[in-house]
C-alpha cells in the first residue's frame, strides 16, 4: 500500500497545474453555455454496477474483476473545485 504522505506529496507537486487546467476548462465550457459546477454535481452521483459474476478471488482466472463486494461505488473529492 502507498503511504498517504507519499500521495499527498505527489499531489502537491501538480496541484497548481490541475487548478489552472480546471479553471481553463470551466472558462471554455462557460463560453459554450455549460456550467462546470453543474457537471461536477452530476458526476458526484455517477455509479458503476459490477455484475455479480465480476468480483472474484485473484486466483480464479474466469472472473473479470477482483473485489470483495458485488457493488462498487466511486467517491468524489470536491476539493479540486476552483
Image (tube, grey):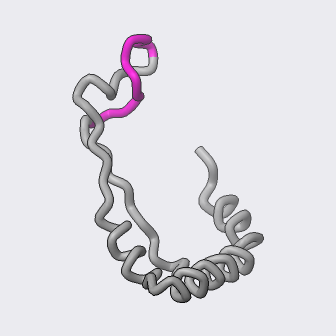
Q: Which residues are magenta?
A: 59-69
Residue at the spot x=29%, y=37% of the render? 50
Res. 45 image quadrant: bottom left
Question: Is residue 65 rendered magenta in the image?
Answer: yes
> Horizontally, is 60 left or right of 69 in the view?
right
Q: Give the number of callouts.
A: 0
Residue at the spot x=45%, y=86% of the render? 33
Residue 26's x, y, as percent? 56, 83
Which of these two is toward me, 31 or 16? 31
Question: Is residue 35 rendered magenta in the image?
Answer: no
Say which quadrant the N terminus sits in: top right
Residue 59's x, y, as percent? 44, 13
* Residue found at the very far right of the displayed protein: 13
> Horizontally, is 81 left or right of 7 in the view?
left
Residue at the spot x=69%, y=82% of the render? 20
Give the answer, above or below, for where 49 lies relative to 24. Answer: above
Say which quadrant the C terminus sits in: bottom right
Residue 41's x, y, as percent? 35, 76
Residue at the spot x=32%, y=27% of the render? 54
Give the answer, above or below, for where 56 lies relative to 78. Answer: above
Amino acid at each position: 500500500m502507498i503511504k498517504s504522505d507519499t500521495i499527498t506529496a505527489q499531489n502537491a507537486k501538480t496541484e497548481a497545474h490541475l487548478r489552472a487546467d480546471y479553471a481553463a476548462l470551466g472558462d471554455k465550457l462557460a463560453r459554450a453555455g455549460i456550467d462546470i459546477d453543474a457537471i461536477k454535481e452530476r458526476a458526484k452521483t455517477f455509479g458503476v454496477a459490477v455484475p455479480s459474476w465480476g468480483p472474484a478471488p485473484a486466483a480464479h482466472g474466469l472472473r473479470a474483476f477482483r473485489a470483495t463486494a458485488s457493488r462498487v461505488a466511486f467517491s468524489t473529492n470536491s476539493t479540486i473545485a476552483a
